[in-house]
Amino acid sequence: MGEPASKIEVKNIKDIGLDEGAARLTPERIEKVINEVIDNETGARLKVYVDTCVHCGLCSEACHYYLSNDKNPVYAPAGKVKQTLWEIVEKKGKVSPDFIRRAAELCYTECNLCRRCAMYCPFGIDVAYMMLTMRRICHKLGVIPQYIQDTAQSHSATMNQMWVKEDEWIDTLFWQEEEAAEEIENLRIPLEKEGAEVMYSVIGPEPKFRAQLIYQAAVIMDVAGVDWTMPATPGWDNSDMAMYTGDNEMMGRLKKEHFETAMRLKVKKIVMGECGHAFRSVYDMGNRAVGWKMPPVQMVHALEFYYDLFKAGKIKVKEKYDKPVTLHDPCNVIRGRGLHEMARYVVNKVCETFIEMTPNREHNYCCCAGGGVINCGPPFRDKRVYSNRVKADQLAATKKKGVEVCIAPCHNCHGGLEDIIHHYKLGMELKFLGDIIYEVMEKPE
Amino acid sequence: MHTIYNFVSGPLAWLAFIIFIGGSIYKIVTMAKLAKKKDPSVYEYWDTGFALRSIAVWSIPFATVNWRKNPVMTLVTFAFHISLIVVPLFLCAHALLWKEVFDINWWYIPNGLADIMTLIVIGSCIFFAVRRSIRHDVKYLTSKSDYLILLMVAAPFVTGFWAYHQFPAYRLMFILHMLSGEFVLAAIPFTRLSHMLYAVFTRGYIGSEFGAVRHARDW
Ligand code: HEM
Ligand code: SF4
Ligand code: SF4
Ligand code: SF4
C-alpha cells in the first residue's frame, strides 16, 4: 500500500550496537520479549492509541524530521508508528530480526520524543510514548546504538553518565571553588551541608567537559545569597540516558538515588542546571518509574530558579547584554513544564534586544538532539543535522532580523544547535542563559 | 420483498443497536479495566478540568493551531462529523420511527437541510478518499481498510438519499439503506470507527498531562 518502496526507503546506518544486537536475535526470542512488554508493561494505552488512530496524517507537519526531509512519509509521526508498533501489534510479535533492526534505528535516531506531534493529533495520540515503548522492546532485546548504551552502562556502574569517579567529582568542585574564589572572595561551593535550602544538581558532562558552568552557578548562588549545597556522593547527577535507552529499571534506580541524596541532606528543594532531558527524568518519567506521582522533593529548573531570583531582586544587572538574542524553547521544560514565560521574563531582564523565533513557546521545533538522539553518537550525526533543516531556517530568519546570539537553556539543545549552526553556516553564537546572567550581573568587587 | 423488509427493519435493527450499545460498553469497560491494571497512571494523572479544557478547545473549529493550519480539512471534517451525527438522529423520517417504536417526541430537522447534510457526508467521504490517494503522508498510512471504512460510512447516506428521492429501484435501495446503516452502527465498536468511543479519553488524558503536570497548552 501507499508509496513505492524505493522512494521512501531509508538505508540502515552502520552501528555495532544495532548490527550485532540484531544478529543475535531469533524470531522466537523476539516474539517472547515483545509479548512480555505488551502484556505486562503497556496495556490499554498502546491498544487504544493503535485502535484510535484514523490514519489521517494531521500529525505529519508537527515533526521536524518530516518537514526537513522533503516530507518523506517514513518520518511522519504516524508513519513511524506504522513501521514499528502497528506491525508488531498486528503480527502479535511475529516479526523478523531485520524488522527489529530497522525499528530500533528508527525509534532511537528518528524521533526526539519531543511530543510536538501530540499537540497536533486531534485525538492527542502520544507518538513519543509509542516510540518509548518500541525502545523498551529494543532494550530488552539488546538492540541499542552503541554510544547511548555506553552512557547507560556508565549510569549503572557509577550512577552518573560520564564514568566520573567519586574523587574526580569532589576534585572538580574544589577546583571550581578555587577558581571562583579568585573572582569573588570567600566564595564556597558548600559540600554536604545538611539542612541547606537548596541542593544544586548537574548533569554528568558538566564536571567532565563544562566545568565553567559549575563555576558560574556558584557565582550566581553566592551573589544571590542562596543557602545551597552540593552532594559529595553519587546522586549528584540528574541526567538519565537509561530513560532513553528503555532501561526503566535503571531509570528508577537513578532517580531514587538522586532524590534520596536530597532527602539525606534535608534540603527544601533541588535546583538543577539548564538541562531539558534531565528535567523530564526527575519531573515526569523517572519519578514515576519509582512510584512517586510527583517528585518527592520540589524540583526547580534553572529557568524557574533564575526567574525567582530576579523577581525577588536578588540579582541586579550591571548593564544589559547588548547583542540581539533569540531564544530556543527546549521541549522538555516548555512542553514539559510550561516555563516559557518565565524564560522570557529573565531574557528581557538581562538582554537589550530579544527577538522571537517562530514558531515558539509550546510550538517550538525540537533541536533534533533530544530524546537521546545526540547520545547515539557520530554515526547518526548527519541524519540528525539534515533532519532539522527547519530549525536552521528558523534560526536564519532571526538572523535576518539582526540576531547574533541564540540562547538555548538545555545541554542537549546546545549540542544539537551547535551542529546545525555549523553545518548550515549560520554564524551565530550559542549561549546558556546562565552564561549571560553571569556576564551582566552585579558582582562584589 | 416484504419479509426481507420486515426482517431488516425489525430484528436486524434491534440486533444492530444491541451490538452497538453492548459492544461499546464492552469495549470501554474492558479498556478501563485493563488500564486500571496495567496503566494505573492514566487514572492518577487524569484531571477532569484540564481534560474538559482540552476537549472543548479541540471541539471548536479553528481554535487550535493545527485546525488553523489545515483550514479545508477542518471545515470538511467538522461539517462531516456534525452531519454524520445529526442526520441519522434528527431526520424527520427517523424521528417518526422514534415516536413509533419508543413513543418519544423527538426533534427533527427540515428535509431540505437533511438533504444538504447528506450530501455533505457523501462529499466529505469522497474528499477523504481523494486526500488519502494524493497526499504522500496520508497515502503511506492508508491501507485498504481505510477506503472500506469510508465506503461503509457513505453507503447508508447514498442509499438513503436515493430512496428518499425515489430514484429507480428505490425500494431495494431502501432495504440496502437500512442494512448498511445497521452494519455501520454495529461496526463502530470493532473497527477504527471506535475512535468515537475513545476520543474523549485519549484527548482528555493528554489534556490532563499537559494541563495539570506540564503546565502547558496542548493545542
Ligand atoms: C462523536 C465522536 C467522534 C469524534 C470526536 C470523531 C473525531 C474524529 C477525528 C478527530 C478524526 C480525525 C481526522 C479528521 O478530522 O477527519 C475523525 C476521522 C474520521 N471519522 Fe470520526 N469522530 C467521531 C465519530 C465518528 C463516527 C460516528 C463516524 C462514522 C460512523 C466517524 C467517521 C470518521 C471517518 C470515516 C474518519 C476518517 C476520515 C479520513 O478518512 O480521513 N467518526 N473522526
Ligand atoms: S520527533 Fe517529536 S514530533 Fe517527531 S515523531 Fe517524535 S515526538 Fe513526534
Ligand atoms: S496519530 Fe493522530 S493525527 Fe496522526 S494519523 Fe493518527 S489520528 Fe491522525
Ligand atoms: S534537546 Fe532540547 S529541543 Fe531537543 S528534545 Fe531536548 S529539550 Fe527538546
Image: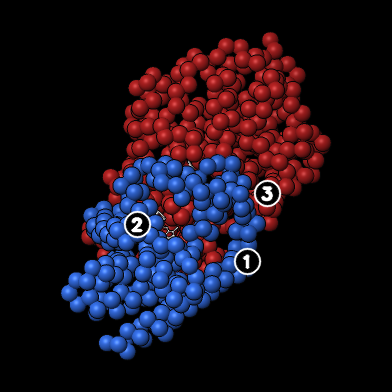
The x and y percentages for residue A83 are 37, 61
Tell whether label 2 touches label 1 (CB within 8 Å): no
The x and y percentages for residue A56 are 35, 56
Q: How far apart are marks 3 and 1 (CA)?
A: 19 Å
Q: Is residue A281 in view?
A: no
Task: Say which label, 1 or 2, has the lower sequence index.
Answer: 1
Chain bearing tag 1 is: B
Image height check: is B104 above or below A135?
below
Mark 3 or 1, closer to the camera: 1
The x and y percentages for residue B71 are 33, 44
Please identify the residue farthest to the top as the structure is shown.
A445
Badge 3 marks a residue whose secondary structure is loop
Same chain letter for marks 3 and 1? no
Instruction: Residue type at mark 1: give it.
Output: Lys
Classify the position of the N terminus of chain A by image quarter. Answer: bottom left
Residue neighbourhood size for the residue with mark 2, other residues' Cα within 10 Å, grouped as few (<14), some (14–19), many (≥20): many
Badge 2 marks a residue whose secondary structure is helix
Q: Which residue is drawn at 80% across and 40% down?
A: A266
Badge 1 marks a residue whose secondary structure is helix
Instruction: Residue type at mark 3: give it.
Output: Met
Residue under circle 2?
Answer: B80
Q: Which mark is residue A318?
A: none
Cβ of disc 2 within 8 Å of ligand 1?
yes
Instruction: Residue type at mark 2: give it.
Output: Phe
The x and y percentages for residue A97 are 39, 68
Q: Which residue is drawn at 46% across and 77% down?
A: B101
Provide the letter of the chain coloured red. Answer: A
Residue under circle 3?
Answer: A294
Residue under circle 1?
Answer: B36
Q: Distance between the residues labelled 2 and 3?
A: 41 Å
